[in-house]
Image: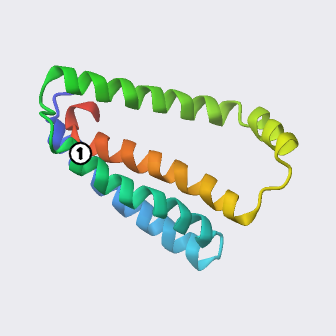
Amino acid sequence: MFGIHPVTAVGTDLLHAAVTKSFGTLVHGYIHTVDWRVVRRLATGSVPMTVLTLLILSLFDLSSAHAAHLISRALGAALLVTALALIFRASPLAYFGNHFPELGPRRAAALTVVPGGVLGALASSRQLVPELSV
């Protein structure tokens, strides 16, 4: 749309994300505003799922229009769900707070690892199919 090659757009996006997230992590880590347990739990789901997703997607022809369309739909649905969750986050929080007032530490950990895995799979598919990032 802007005349920028998809690989250039993805590379620029990755460079920007790496720099800003690295500095953000350093600053928040330095002032102790990062809950490293949550980070570790998210990474426990995200890192293995990223590797697994990349391995699985490498077996397919991702240059086909059908594959790009399928991945585009999945990412679009994930973005829509994320946006709705952010907009209406008070309602689900109240619902789950009333119905599950006490989560044990193991269950809370498991419920944090799963979204990490989903995010790892989605992020790796986005990076593997550059035409979706433009």
In the visual, does 38 lie left or right of 5? right
Q: Which quarter shows the C terminus? A: top left
Residue 37 visible in the shown view: yes
Give me the residue at 63% from left, 76% from top: 31
Q: Nearer the viewer, residue 50 or 10?
A: 50
Q: Kindly give the residue lying farthest to the bottom in the view shown.
A: 30
| Label 1 sits on residue | 56
How far across and down, in percent of the image, does residue 99 sit?
84, 40
Q: Secondary structure at mark 1?
A: helix
Above or below 5: residue 124: below
Question: Is 80 on the left or on the right of 111, as rendered?
Answer: left
- On-image quarter of the N terminus: top left
70 left or right, relative to 36:
left
- Residue 21 lies, in percent from the top left, at 44, 61
- Does residue 21 appear left or right of residue 53 in this picture? right
Q: What residue lies at 47% left-to-right and 32% top-to-bottom?
A: 78
Figure quadrant of residue 131: top left
Please give the name of the residue rendered at 37% of the width and 59% of the height, measured from the top-left corner: 48
The answer to whether residue 86 is above or below residue 108 is above
